[in-house]
Amino acid sequence: MSQGKEAELAGHIRGAVNNGCTEIEIQETMLQTSVYCGVPTGVSMFRVADKVISQLKAEGLLKA
């Protein structure tokens, strides 16, 4: 993610949901990752995740 890989992150988030991860688990993982990647990267990750999670909810693939 720190190298501008937003599309790859979106795919990994979708895959995590397909494997049973919850929205909270995804957020917690990104929070932990932000410590190592830096806050600006963390903010970018959360923006991507918010978009993907909203799409998954709209598609009925993730509980609202």
Image (cartoon, helix red, strand yellow):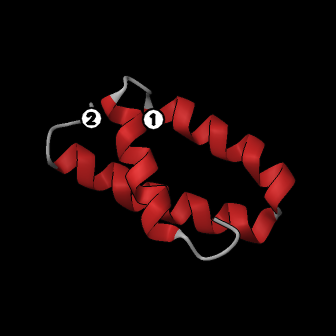
Q: In the figure, is residue 50 to the left or right of 40?
A: left
Q: Is residue 10 left or right of residue 5?
A: left
Quadrant of the drawing holding the C terminus: top left
**Which quadrant is home to the N terminus?**
bottom right
Q: Residue at x 36, y 56 (%)?
A: 52
User: Based on the displayed image, in which of its 4 quarters is residue 28 positioned?
Assistant: top right
Amino acid type of the residue that numbered disc 2 sits on in the rendered structure: Leu
- Residue placed under numbered mark 1 in the picture: 23
Amino acid carrying mark 1 in the image: Glu
Closest to the observer, 64 or 22: 22
Where in the figure is residue 4, as x and y percent of width and height?
Answer: 60, 76
Outermost residue to the bottom:
4
Left/right of residue 6 with respect to residue 44 in the rendered view: left
First in residue order: circle 1 vs circle 2: 1
Is 22 situated above or below 6? Answer: above
Quadrant for residue 43, please give it.
Answer: bottom right
Q: Height in image: 37 above or below 58? A: below
Answer few, some or many: residues within 10 Å of disc 1's Cα (few below 14, many 20 plus, some between 14 and 19): some
Q: Residue at x 17, y 49 (%)?
A: 58
- Do the residues under discs 1 and 2 have CB atoms within 8 angstroms? yes
Secondary element type, mark 2: loop
Point out which mark residue 62 bears: 2
| Vertical order, 57 against 34 (above or below) | above
Res 42 label? none
Please, which residue is most extreme toward the top here?
Answer: 20
**Camera-side residue: 29 or 24?**
29
Nearest to the observer: residue 38 or residue 9:
9
Looking at the rendered structure, the number of numbered marks drawn on it comes to 2
Q: Position of residue 37 (x, y in %)?
A: 80, 59
Residue 3: x %, y % from top left:
67, 74
Residue 39 image offset from top left, x and y in percent: 79, 64
